[in-house]
Amino acid sequence: MDISRITDQLYIAAHPKAEDADAIRDMNVRLILNMIFIRPAEVYRNHPFRMLTLRTFDSIFLPIPLGKLVDGVKAALPVIEDGESVLVYCRKGRHRSVAMAAAVLIGQGCSANEAMQLISSKRSKADPYAWHIQRRIRKFEEVWRREN
């Protein structure tokens, strides 16, 4: 199981396997943000989980759409406010999921720098400083602050 606890209610993972579902359920995860095109295991599409699929590419040529980051944050914040947890995943748990988790942290009041530093300290394989990911995190912060 390749899952890292970022905060009490936010986790980043590589693509979770069906056999990880009990452990993920025990983490009080109720919302799963899927950032990839691969269909999740059936168990994650059923109660008590809610799956939001925000398919994106990890590419320097196709930046993560800011609208997808906004949609993910808007879905995650009420779950966290209710005391439940959110799991964000992509293929390896390095870039797309990290950008989304950083956006959630920004939505909770962190700066982009604080979010990237926290994620880096909690998940060794996370790379929020990859230039194409850092750029999206910083752009998200700018847009989020302006609109909220």
Image (tube, helix red, strand yellow):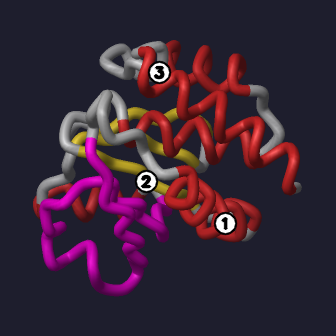
Name the quadrant of the C terminus: bottom right
Q: Amino acid at mark 1?
A: Lys
Name the quadrant of the N terminus: top left
**In this figure, which residue is indicated by the disc labeled 2?**
87
When asked about the image quadrant of residue 62, the answer is top left
Give the mark nearest the N terminus, 1 or 2: 1
**In this figure, which residue is indicated by the disc labeled 3?**
128
Q: Are marks 1 and 2 in contact (CB under 8 Å)?
A: no
> How many numbered markers are drawn?
3
Give the vertical position of 132 relative to 17 (above or below): above
Distance Cα–Cα, label 3 vs label 1 = 21 Å
Q: Residue at x 18, y 67 (%)?
A: 40
- Residue 117, labelled with which disc? none
Q: Residue furthest front?
A: 61
**In this figure, which residue is indicated by the disc labeled 1?**
74
Give the vertical position of 96 relative to 51 (above or below): above
* Label 1 CA crowd tier, 10 Å (few <14, some 14–19, many 20+): few
Judged left or right of residue 24, residue 117 is right
Q: Are marks 3 and 1 in contact (CB under 8 Å)?
A: no
- Judge by depth and name the residue closer to the eye, 56 or 77: 56
**Helix, strand or loop status at disc 2:** strand
Give the mark nearest the N terminus, 2 or 3: 2
Q: Amino acid at mark 3?
A: Pro
| Residue 124 location (% of width, % of height) | 36, 14
- Marks 2, 3: nearer the viewer: 3
- Residue 41 is inside the magenta segment: yes
Judged left or right of residue 70, residue 90 is left
Q: Which residues are magenta?
A: 28-57
* Label 2 CA crowd tier, 10 Å (few <14, some 14–19, many 20+): many
Distance Cα–Cα, label 1 vs label 2 = 14 Å
Q: Residue furthest bottom?
A: 47
